Amino acid sequence: MLAGEGQAAWTREELLREVEPRNGYSAESATFVQLVEVLCGMEERERRDFLRFTTGVRVLPPGGLKNLDPKLTVVKKICDDDPDQHFPSANTCFHFLKLPQYSSKDRLAAQLRAALAHGMDGFFFN
């Protein structure tokens, strides 16, 4: 299929290998590890929504995450107050996910799901 494989599938190993943590996060950062866990627990529809939120399209290119260009990058979103009160945001042109440093995996999952549900049709979560 020229437009992609028509799916949004990945494994934990693929995420750890192909998603690049930067600007405040490393592969060992608790928030980055929690994000990987949340992404692995998502259903197909949620994965498609995540891809649309971060890349602008709902499917991966042929070959999956390794062929996403530019690579999906997770950067720390700096918040002036409690990060738990902020939503993640994205820059789809550069495949950047701007992720606050949440206090727990549950809070990360809740805020990410809220952003996916409400932040897809405009630039509300910049």
Image (cartoon, rainbow, N blue to C red):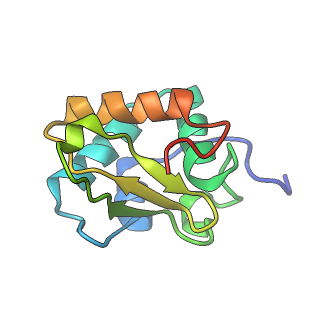
Query: Where is 115 relative to 22, above or below?
Result: above
- Residue drawn at x 63%, y 71% is 69
Q: What percent of the width, then of the height, locates residue 57?
A: 70, 48
- Residue drawn at x 59%, y 27% is 45
Residue sitting at the far front: 80
- Name the residue nearer the viewer: 118 or 107: 118
Locate residue 60 relative to residue 88 in the image: left or right: right
Query: Where is 95 relative to 39, above or below?
Result: below
Q: What percent of the width, then of the height, locates residue 92?
A: 61, 58
Locate residue 87 relative to residue 29 in the image: left or right: right
Image quadrant of residue 44? top right
Residue sitting at the far right: 2
Q: How many marks?
A: 0
- Residue drawn at x 74%, y 42% is 6
Locate residue 126 relative to residue 33 in the image: left or right: right
- Name the residue nearer the viewer: 35 or 11: 35
Q: What percent of the width, then of the height, locates residue 23?
A: 30, 73
